[in-house]
Image (cartoon, coloured by chain):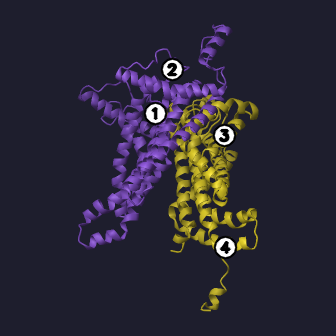
Amino acid sequence: MLTYTIRRLILTIPTLLFISFVIFLIVKLSPSDPTSNLPLTIPPEVREKIRESLGVNKPLLFQYFLWLKQFFWLEPRIYLETAFGWDLGTAGEVRLISYQTRSPVMDLIWQRMPQTLWVVGTAYVVGILIAVPIGIYSAYKQYSIFDQAGTFVSMVGFSVPPFFSGVLVIVIFSVMIPNDSFWWLPSIYDTTHQVTDWESFKFQFRQMIMPVMVLALQITAQISRFARASMLDNLNQDYVRTARAKGVRERGVVMVHVLRNSMIPVVTVIALGIPGIFGGAIITEQVFKVNGLGQLLIIAIQGGDVPTVQTLTFIFAILIVLFNLIADVLYGLLDPRIRYD
Amino acid sequence: MTDTPVETRKAARSQWWDVWDQFKSHKGAMLGAIFFVIILFGVLIGPLLWPYDATTIDIRSRNQGPSWGHPMGTDQLGRDTFARVMIGGRVSLAVGLTAMFIALVLGTFIGVLAGYFKRLDGILMRTTDLFLALPLLPLLLVVIMLFRETLSARFGPEGGIFILMVSAIGITSWMQTARIVRGDVLSLKEREFVLAARSIGTPNRRMITRHVLPNVLSPIMVSATLGIATAIITESSLSFLGLGFPPDFPTWGRLLRDGTDFLQQYPERAIWPGLMISLTVLGVNYMGDGLRDALDPRIRGR
C-alpha cells in the first residue's frame, strides 16, 4: 500500500507539470496586454519598459519556467521564512505579481481563501450530514414514499443549477419577506463581518444560511443517491442474512454491519467531490457576492490578469489531482479486498 | 419444437419495440420526454406564431407584469419576455444539442479506438485522465474570454460565440462517454460473434462499424441524453457569469443574469428563464433515467 501511494505521488508530478503547461499555453495565447489598464498618459517607450520588466517579451518557454520557479520554489520559501523567521535569501527576488493589483498573486489568494473555505466547507459538511442519513433510510425502505420523495428531490438537486436556486431563495427570503421579519435573510454575504458576541454570531449564521444551503442541495443530491445505491448493494448480501439469523438486532445489522461496508465507496466519492465543489462555488459566490476565490478568478479573467488566472486555475487543478489520489488511497485503506500491491 | 404455431406466426418485433414498451412504463421518463418535445417544438415554432418579436423595443409598455398580451410581462425596454424566453430557448437548446453531439462523436471515437486497438489504449486513456484532471469551469471561462474577439470578428458576433461555446463545451465533456464506450468495447471484443466475424476475415474497419458500434449504442444513447442536460447547464452558467453570448442576444442564462438586476422590483423576470432551464434539464434527466432502464436487457425482461 505504501509503495502504491509513493508511486502515485511520483506520478502526480508529470501530470501536474503537463496540466500547468496546458493552462500556461491557453492563458498565454490571450491577446490581452498587461499595460492596457494603465493610464493613457504613459508614453509608449515607458510602456515598453513596463512590459519588459514584467517579462512579457521573453520566449514562451522561458516565461513558463520562470512561472514554475516562482510558484514551486520561491513562494514556498517565502512561507517558510514568514512562518519560522528563517532567512532563505528571497529578499531580492521577484514574486508572481498580479497585473491588476500589483500585489503578489499568492497574497491575493490567501486573502480570498478563508471566505471560500468557510462557505464551501460548511456547505460540504452540511450536505454530507443531510445526505448520508437520507441515503441510509431510503435504501432501507426502498420504494417507500420517503424513498420516492428522496429520489425526486435529488433529481431536482441535480437539475436546478445553483444560479437559479440561489436567485430563487433570494427572491423568497430577501425580497418577498419583509426586512423586519424573523425569516428575512441578507442576500449579500458580508465578509468583513467579525464574530465577537452572540448578536454578531447570529448575524453570521443568518448570512451563511442561503449560500450554504444552495451549495448543500447539490452535494446532498449526489451523495444521498450514492449512499442509497451503496446500501442497497450490501443489504442483500449473505453476511446480512447471517447476522440476522444469529439474532443481531435490526438496528445493529443496519447501522453496524451494512453501514460500515456501504460507507467505503461513499467516502471516496466525498473525497472526489471536493474539487468539484470549488468549481460550483464560483457561481454561488457570484450569486451571493462572496468575495472568495471564485470571484477573484472572474475579476482576473475579465481584467486579463494573466498571472492570477494561471495560478488560480492551476491551484484548482492541484486540488483535483490531489483529491483523486486521496480517494484512491482511501479506497485501498478502507477496503482490504482492494489492496493495490 | 415446443412452440405453438400461434406464437411463431406473431409479427416480427425488433428489439426497439421492447425498449419502447419498457420506456413507456417509466412514468417520469415519459413525462420528461413529452415535456422536452413540447419545449423543443415551442422554441422552434413558437416565435413564428407569436405576434411579438424578441428584439422589438416598445418603450411605452415597459416593465409590465403578466397579462394576456404579455403572459410573462415585458422587460425594462418593453420587449416581450415570452418571445425572448422562446428565442433564448432556441439558442440554449441548440448549444446543448450541438455540444452534446460533438462530445458524443469525440467520446465514441476515442472510446472505440482505445477499446479496440490495444496499442492505442494506454495513450488514449492517459489523455482522458489528463482531461478529467483539468479544472473545466475555470478553463472554459478563460478559453471563452480569450477567443471571443477573434471568432466574433471571423464569424460575426453570434455565429462566432456559438462556434466557440459549442466546441469548448464539446471538447471538455467527452471523457465520460469515452470511458464507458471503451469498457463496453473491451468486453465485446471477447465475445464469440466477434471471433466468428474475425474468422471469416472481416477487416477492422467493418468490424467496428458492423459489429462493435451497434452493440455500444445503448450506453452512447444514455450518455447523449445526460450530455444534453450538462451542456445546457454549462452554457447557462457561462452566460450567467457574463461570458456567453452578447448582451442583446437572449439565451436562458443571459436572461436570468439580466433578470437578477431587477430582482427587487420584478423577481419574475429572473424566475421564468431559470424555471425553463431547470424544467428542461429535469425532463432530460428523467428521460435519460428511463432510457437507461429501457436499454438494459436485464431490467427489460421484468
Tell me whether marks 4 and 1 sit on the same chain. no
Q: Is residue A56 above or below residue A133?
A: above
Under mark 2, the amino acid is Arg
Label 4 Cα crowd, 10 Å radius (few <14 / some 14-19 / many 20+):
few
Picture residue at 40% right of the left edge, 59% below the top = A228
Picture residue at 42% right of the left edge, 60% below the top = A229
Picture residue at 74% right of the left edge, 33% below the top = B156
Provide the chain ID for the residue under circle 2: A
Residue A285 has which mark?
1
- For label 1, the SS is helix
Of labels 1 and 3, the one closer to you: 1
Horizontal side, residue A117 vs residue B30: left or right: left
Under mark 1, the amino acid is Glu
Q: Nearer the viewer, residue B49 or B154?
A: B154
Horizontal side, residue A331 vs residue B75: left or right: left
Q: Nearer the viewer, residue A23 or B214?
A: A23
Task: Name the residue beneath numbered marker 3.
Answer: B52
The chain displayed yellow equals B
